[in-house]
Amino acid sequence: MSKLCQSACKAARSLLSATAAASSPRTSLLAEGRNAALATLTNLGRKTLPTAYAYSYHHNSSAAAAGWLAAIPAAVYMLQDQEAHAAEMERTFIAIKPDGVQRGLISEILSRFERKGFKLVAIKLVWEGEGVIKYGRKLIGATDPQKSEPGTIRGDLAVVVGRNIIHGSDGPETAKAEIGLWFEPRELVSYTSNEEKWIYGVN
């Protein structure tokens, strides 16, 4: 436990002990405790626990205030834990190399990171092939998932139009415009897949 959390625990215990022993000064002491707690949380750079503070303010019973004060150490610890977690987050660049592309391992590689629990924060895709626009629309499914056929992405995985999870260009001109929004021409790579001659019968 950190020194800050230990200090908060000690302060809370002191306030609770003083509250139990005091009689007439109880109200002012509890108010002082609330203010001290709020100052501690503010110094952490967070705007948290407003509901708890308001609750203890409007319920002047010793039980309500004592419960709120007892929660301070845990709240401080949670705030520190969140900050530590944010500080530990990293980002890495991953590029799937030509051999990985040729071997059809793109989805396998992506799924391994996803299954591990890492969060994908950037990705862009352009698929190429004969009839890819029309087939892409069939594979995606109707805009309304309720009207999408089973076996389509939206038909299997989505429920409502506002959350239909995927977009695909609906025609050559739209595809050209949308690709232009997300990619510079130099970012699009032209290459021949080892599978093309078997797919299209090209020698």
Image (cartoon, grey):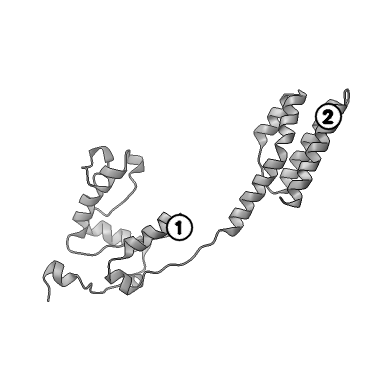
- Three-letter code, disc 2: Thr
10 Å crowding of disc 1: few (<14), some (14-19), many (20+)? few
Residue in front for this viewpoint, 116 or 62 = 116
State the residue position of label 2. Answer: 19
Judging by the rendered image, the residue that carries numbered circle 1 is 121
Q: State how far apart marks 2 and 1 are (Cα).
A: 50 Å
Query: Residue 144's x, y, as percent?
Result: 27, 40
- For label 1, the SS is loop
Res 40 label: none
- Answer with left or right where residue 167 lies relative to residue 120: left
Q: Residue at x 72, y 42 (%)?
A: 73
Q: Position of residue 107 (x, y in %)?
A: 32, 60
From this view, report whether residue 127 is shown above or below residue 36. Answer: below
Q: Nearer the viewer, mark 2 or mark 1?
A: 2
Image quadrant holding the C terminus, namely bottom left
Amino acid, disc 1: Val
Residue 97 or residue 63, whichever sits in front: 63
The residue under the point 54% across, 62% down is 90
Q: Quadrant of residue 201?
A: bottom left
**Farthest residue in the front direction?**
1
Give the mark nearest the N terminus, 2 or 1: 2
Q: Could you say which quadrant of the image residue 182 lies in?
A: bottom left
Dot 2 falls on a residue whose secondary structure is: helix
- Left or right: where does residue 107 sit relative to residue 133? right
Residue 131: percent from left, percent from top: 17, 60
**In the rendering, at what x and y percent does residue 163 appear?**
36, 42
Q: Which is more toward the observer, 168 or 95?
A: 95
User: In this rendering, is residue 190 above or below 106?
Assistant: below
